Amino acid sequence: MLSLTSTLAQATQDEVLRSISDNVGASIDGNKLLAVLCALAGTLILVAILNLRRNRQIAPKAMNHPAKLLKEVGRALHLKPEQLKKIKSLAQQKNVQPLTLLICPSLLAAAMKPRDDKPLQPK
């Protein structure tokens, strides 16, 4: 029984060695190699693009319109539309931008004081 197992093992080992030598000595098909290289390059490019997209930070859009910026700042400060209208009217009376009143509390306090027909100047 033991001799039969070693004979089968020897035949299998010889077949494996013969198969390896046949495969190593075989010529390489250029079309298959080119297809594998293109697939590998495509995969690498796809991974690089996905990595760049994942690492990209999303920045808020620039506000180039004063009214839109005022509205956005009003939302951030949780101001009601009536409060924004009052700030706009104060800014018109004092000849300053409404956003300036929101940014500079001293100007806002001065604008809320009784009228004195002088334009506000920052201190």
Image: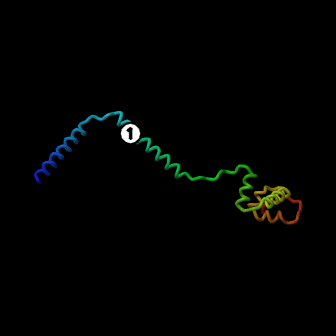
- Residue that appears at 38% across and 39% down: 37
Task: Name the image quarter holding residue 16.
Answer: top left
* Depicted 112 relative to depicted 12: above or below: below
- Colouring: rainbow
114 relative to 104 in the view: left or right: right
Identify the residue shown where x is 74% and y is 59%: 74
* Quarter of the picture holding the C terminus: bottom right
* Quarter of the rendering containing residue 43: top left
**The residue under label 1 is which amino acid type?**
Leu
**Residue 80's spot in the image, x, y percent?**
77, 61
| Rendered residue at 52%/51% (across/down) | 54
User: Camera-side residue: 24 or 14?
Assistant: 14
Location of residue 50 in the rendering, given as x and y in whole percent from the top left corner = 50, 48
Q: Would you call the spot at circle 1 few (<14 residues within 10 Å), some (14-19), or many (20 or more)?
A: few
- Quarter occupied by residue 88: bottom right
Residue 65 appears at what percent x and percent y? 73, 49
User: For this view, does 123 lie left or right of residue 42?
Assistant: right
Q: Nearer the viewer, residue 10 or 107?
A: 10
* Residue 114 position in % (x across, y down): 88, 65
Q: Residue at x 83, y 59 (%)?
A: 90
Is residue 53 positioned above or below 22 on the image?
Answer: below
Q: Residue furthest front?
A: 1
Q: Report which residue position mark 1 lands on.
A: 37
Horizontal side of residue 76 vs 115, given as left or right: left
| Total number of numbered discs in the rendering | 1
Secondary structure at numbered mark 1: helix
